Amino acid sequence: MSLFEKKAYDAEIQQKVLFISGELTAEAAEFAQQEKINVIRLGSPSKEISIGEEVVGEELPAEEVPVEEVTAKEEGVKQEEVAVEEETRQQGMSAIESALSEILTKAPEPKAEVKPEEAKPKAKARLLKKAIAPEVLKLVPESTARRFMAVPLSVKGNTLEMAMANPADIFALQILEHQSKMRVKPVVVEEQEIREAIDFNYRSFGQIQEQLAGIPEDMAGGDEMDLIAATADAPVANALHLIIDEAAKARASDIHIEPEEDRLRVRYRIDGVLQDTLSLPITIHPALTSRIKIMSDMNIADHIRPQDGQFTIEASGRPIDVRVATCPTVHGEGTVLRLLDKTLAARELSGLGLRPETLEKYQEMLRVPFGMIVASGPTGSGKTTTLYASINQLDKVSRKIITIEDPVEYRFSNINQIQINPKAGLTFASGLRSILRLDPDIILVGEMRVVDTANTALHAALTACLVFSSLQVISPVSLTNPQLGPSIEPFPVA
């Protein structure tokens, strides 16, 4: 940002306009173009202007309208008064052009040369080693800080100094000023330093770092008994609980714990989008993974095969079911925790944020006696929450409702819920065929993954059942997509 633009920004000037008479010199015209100055010639007819473009109008040359003719036509105006007026106007224009010339000829002040190796440690010391005052930190929510890679540093008067990875992001500046109710002064800092500063300073993650600091660094080489002993210690258990608690507060649907060569990466999936949350020492990975396995009743000694498990924990003041999946990678076992908030099972459709007209149309669809309702979208987009809210609104007394799921995420009263078991031969397709013989009114199929399941669900919807299901595609019309095979006929979907 140039000095000219900075002054304009400070004064909240949105456009820079220069009024001149005559012609600009080539040097002045080039400067006006660079600084995006609107140049308007006096005496020209008005026309629409654009930033950085010189306005060229049809000037009325002075010789076409002589001063003598003006004096003769205008009664009561003397020739001396016209001459004085013209001289004053020329002096004003000369002053403007002189100011522009002064800006052009003024040499920039020499800046003190700072070596990169000297500046970088100072930035790190300022951001990472010095705690930011809580009253400053609370001006910007943590979610906003991570979204725009910006962390507040200090307050001077009505100005908030912000470390930003991209200070040219005007949208980010507007959001930060709106939330902090202050004028933001950006300071350029590397993104990695800002991420570490956010992890270090925000309270909850600072507590996680404190808990993990008590774990021995040589834990990676320990045996299984050492890992079991370590996971029983308070630091590992408390750190895991804090990670889950923060995810529950942020309404995250999943927690991804991913080992890399030199760090343990933790990400939250919020509103369907993965967001970097924590960067932990790689040395705590074995103890943290072992703690998760013990809570999920997994085999702590098996590191070469994928495993699944589940446990329940209280986080953010409410019970959370956690589905766990591990899978070996080149840097160790990766872990994904799926968070299922039990309080969402009783959520109503009106609390999902649907538009009034959309909610009204959807409730009309729920009143039809048969057909199919498919919730589509990527992972974490709210498909299951929407289907459960729909089922929860239906009449469970006079209608028989059966669900087949993998796994049963939420439990309802007055509803028959079936957990599939492929080892016992109970799949979505075979279970759905059995359900049709149980005289159901409403069926919920957790997910249509194969052609056989989709075909059975479609035929059930065409007979006398209202079928609910989900599909991990952008649109339900993708039922006719080769993803499910060519056996799906288009006309039942339409």
Image (cartoon, helix red, strand yellow):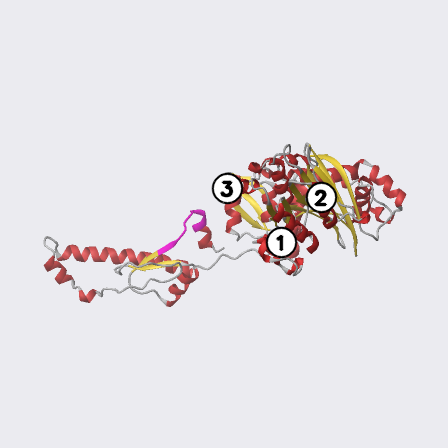
Vertically, is 395 above or below 77?
Answer: above
Mark 1 / mark 3, whichever is N-terminal: 3
Q: Bin the neighbour count of mark 3 within 10 Å (Cα to Cα): few under 14, some 14-19, many 20 and up.
A: few
Q: Is residue 116 left or right of residue 92?
A: right
The dot on residue 461 is: none
Confirm or deny contact between disc 1 and disc 3 (CB under 8 A).
no
Q: Nearer the viewer, residue 274 or 54?
A: 274
Span colored in magenta = 8-17
How far apart marks 3 and 2 lie (CA) works out to 59 Å
**Residue drawn at 10 percent across, 59 percent down:** 72
Q: Amino acid at mark 1?
A: Val
Mark 3 highlights which residue?
178
Mark 2 highlights which residue?
437
**Residue drawn at 10 percent across, 54 percent down:** 75
Q: Is residue 18 left or right of residue 127?
A: left
**Residue drawn at 58 percent across, 41 percent down:** 369
Vertically, is 136 above or below 480?
Answer: above
Mark 3 / mark 2, whichever is N-terminal: 3
The dot on residue 473 is: 1
User: Measured from the top left, where is residue 469 in percent x and y?
Assistant: 64, 47
How far apart marks 1 and 3 lie (CA) works out to 36 Å
Q: Quadrant of residue 103?
A: bottom left
User: Measured from the top left, where is residue 53 in percent x and y?
Assistant: 38, 62
User: Measured from the top left, where is residue 482 in percent x and y?
Assistant: 64, 60
Q: Nearer the viewer, residue 37 or 223?
A: 223
Q: Is residue 350 left or right of residue 296?
A: left
The C terminus lies in which quarter of the figure? bottom right
Residue 10 belongs to magenta span = yes
Which secondary structure lies at badge 3? helix
User: Measured from the top left, where is residue 363 in percent x and y?
Assistant: 54, 40
Q: Amino acid at mark 3?
A: His
How far apart marks 1 and 2 lie (CA) works out to 30 Å
